[in-house]
Amino acid sequence: VKAKGRDGVFMFNEEMSNRVESHLEIERLLHFALANNEITLHFQPQFDREGRIIGAESLARWNNPTLGSVSPAQFIPIAEQTGLIVELGHYILETGFRTLREWRDEGICLDQFSINISMRQFTHHAFVEQVEDLVQRYLDEELCHKLIFEITESIVAEDIKRVISVMNRLKESGIRFSMDDFGTGYSSLSYLNRLPLDEIKIDRSFVGALDQKEGDRMMVVTILNMANILKLNIVAEGVETAEQLDFLLRYDCHIFQGYYYSKPLPKEQFDAYYRSRA
Ligand code: C2E
Ligand code: CA
Ligand code: CA
Ligand code: CA
């Protein structure tokens, strides 16, 4: 914890210097992670109301010999701060696109495939060209229409006109957009209405609290009603129990994702899981 000295100067203590060191260590090792093939993608299946697999979300994994497995919640923000996210994001897109293509070749047919896009990656001047280049190399029209880019509410802090223009350029290729972690940030209804969104993901903190907190139940019902009025698809993430699923079904949620069905899986395991349910 940061401790303030008598003169208002920050003083270093042991704990703090360790934390700074490990942050720098992570940052240093992250630079080599791509070249050393330490970053992989896992895929978490998504289900429709009848329990059929209709999609997947791609989630990055980093396994380092020294650090072990590092959570994306930890290394993605570091990649953002250092600008590494541009290179990392490109790798994630390329691997994701290639996987989508492989799935079709293997007879695995999904309606949608989601990739998380960080803010810094989205606002990078070369983002659209990067995506269009990869689309040309790996995808065709059919596969493009399966792609969903997940963005977060932090986008609202950016130049909103530019955000809309980037989204619209990508939508010309058939790519759709989802608002991730919905309800946690500082979204306003007017922004929600202005952005060319196709889907909303209810944050798992609300889904997880469905059985406990009346306020969160109301929040989820309100989001579901609103999404249905705005004709947006709605995904509930972090569904862990049959009770949560029942509640979401009752209030017209469309798509479900969470440990109740499956954790994010490496590709071979995802393929086996898909086949076992087909
Ligand atoms: P997110 O996009 O909100 O992803 C959902 C997180 O919830 C994932 O954590 C997933 O493994 C976890 N999850 C799914 N179902 C359940 C459940 O039933 N219960 C619980 N407790 N958790 C569940 P993960 O994989 O650790 O990713 C954390 C965050 O890191 C993601 O949150 C996303 O913000 C970021 N991230 C992951 N992969 C990428 C990526 O490729 N690019 C970018 N830009 N960010 C990524
Ligand atoms: Ca996500
Ligand atoms: Ca989310
Ligand atoms: Ca999240």
Image (spheres, rainbow, N blue to C red):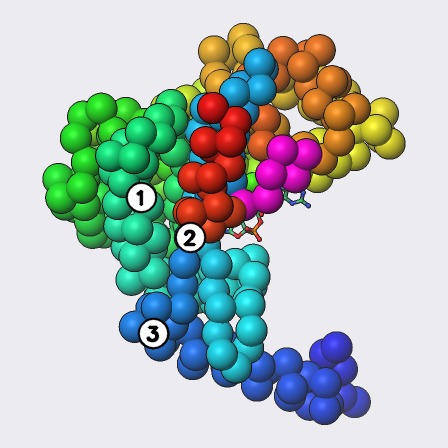
Distance in Å between CA atoms under marks 3 and 2? 15 Å
Label 2 amino acid?
Leu
Few, some or many residues within 10 Å of mark 1 (<14, 14–19, 20+): some
The residue that appears at 25% across and 29% down in the rendered structure is 143
Helix, strand or loop at mark 2: strand
The residue that appears at 58% across and 20% down in the rendered structure is 51
Q: Quadrant of residue 165?
A: top left
x and y percent of residue 228 in the render? 55, 11
Label 3 amino acid?
Asn
For residue 265, above or below residue 258: below
Q: Which residue is mark 1?
A: 99
In the rendered structure, are the residues bearing label 1 and label 3 in contact, judged by CB atoms less than 8 Å apart? no
Q: Which residues are magenta?
A: 258-264
In this figure, what is the number of numbered marks? 3
Q: Is residue 259 magenta?
A: yes
Q: Quadrant of residue 209?
A: top right
Q: Is residue 68 left or right of residue 36?
A: right
Query: In the current view of this chain or complex, which residue is farthest to the top?
Result: 229
x and y percent of residue 127 in the render? 24, 48
In this orientation, which residue lies closer to the viewer: 57 or 263? 263
In the rendered structure, are the residues bearing label 2 and label 1 in contact, judged by CB atoms less than 8 Å apart? yes
Q: Which residue is mark 3?
A: 36
